[in-house]
Image (spheres, rainbow, N blue to C red):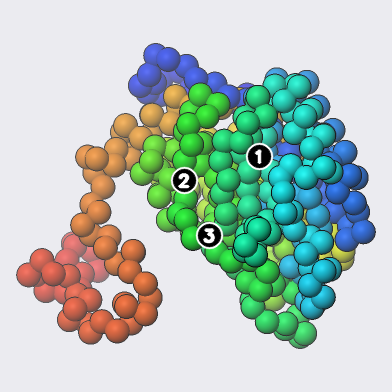
Amino acid sequence: MPTPPEGRTRLSSRVREITVGAAQLGPIARHDTRAEVVERLMALLQQGSDQGCDLVVYPELALTTFFPRWWITDTDELNSFYETEMPSPEVKPLFDEAARLGVGFCLGYAELTPDGHRYNTYLLVDGDGAEVAKFRKVHIPGHEDHEPERPFQHLERAYFEPSPQTFGTWTAFGGEIGLALCNDRRWSETYRVMALADVELILIGYNTPIHYFPDPSQDVLAGFHSRLVMQAGAYQNGTFVVGVAKGGVEEGVEGLAESCIIAPSGEVLAQATTDGDELVVATCNLDWCAAYKNTLYDFSRYRRPEMYAAIAEPMAQRKNQTTAEAAPTNGETSGHQGGMP
Ligand code: CDT
């Protein structure tokens, strides 16, 4: 297992290691029951326990098929894909077994709240079976309306509200843990917001159809883009990143697999070799993060937040600004001010 090579800066004498299992899932069919899926989750949990995992991480929407691929107008049918309580009776065996084994886990599911809100949710549970954190997906991709010209739908924007809360971090498993879901991993802000709270290990479940209808030229790059964003997010923020797929051909749609565990150096420590149920394991020395957070990415020393205000402005506000207002406000001329063209 790669660890920081001798000679790389170790800034802490206290070694904090967490063994993580990225519990990739293969396809879940539309007719598969929760009980059948939970059996598979428990098999991966057992493998994780056998391999010394402290934490087993499941994908986004890990209890059902990826239902946003269909335009579903019947409310009862749509609701059948959501959880109204967690753990539900069908999922409780997973919670009980994880607590018995002393293994924490992170589980993605569709959440329907008592007051009718629908979220794409990621739940982190510790080794004693206690809930640590509930995260709701921030960036909701796809489209709102039925688009029959597509070979399959991506109706997340019809079926989920974006989280009203920003990204968080939680102290657990001996470190600072952050959560994100699928499309969140493509946005650099996701990692940076968590890094500002000293995140050390970001867990990201995903369902990524390889075919991207708006621009199929991107299809061949699906794996590259997925790794690119997670490796950059890890390195630029001095954090481990665990990306966990539901992959393979599910109801005729091919999903990206390639689950992986990435070090703060940006290096991939371990990656799935199949597109089915597979546990990818790596031991993460959380003290490795400091080698980046305290040097090249020492935020308090080098970051220039006063230069980044535009990042936090809504687009509408930016479009309403005149060129002059949008120009640098430091009294210098606008445009390039460096030595290179
Ligand atoms: N589940 C999810 O967020 N998938 C998106 C697909 C984007 S294309 C609509 C992803 O970013 O992988």
- Whether 306 is drawn above or below 51: the answer is below
Looking at the picture, which amino acid does disc 2 mark? Gly
Given the image, on which type of amino acid does mark 1 rest? Cys
Q: Position of residue 153 (x, y in %)?
A: 74, 74
Q: Amino acid at mark 3?
A: Ser
Hey, which quadrant is residue 268 in on the image? top right
The residue lying toward the viewer, choosing from 196 and 128, is: 128
Q: Which residue is mark 2?
A: 168
Residue 130 x %, y %? 63, 31
* Residue at image location 58% in from the left, 24% down from the top: 18
- Secondary structure, mark 2, is loop
First reached walking from the N terminus: tag 3 or tag 2 = 3
Above or below, 66 against 100 in this view is: below
Q: On the rendered structure, is 66 left or right of 169?
A: right
Q: What is the CA distance from the residue labelled 2 to the residue labelled 1?
A: 15 Å
SS label for mark 3: loop
Q: Badge 1 is on which residue?
A: 106
Q: What residue sits 38% from the left and 75% below the top?
A: 315
In this figure, which residue is indicated by the disc labeled 3? 163
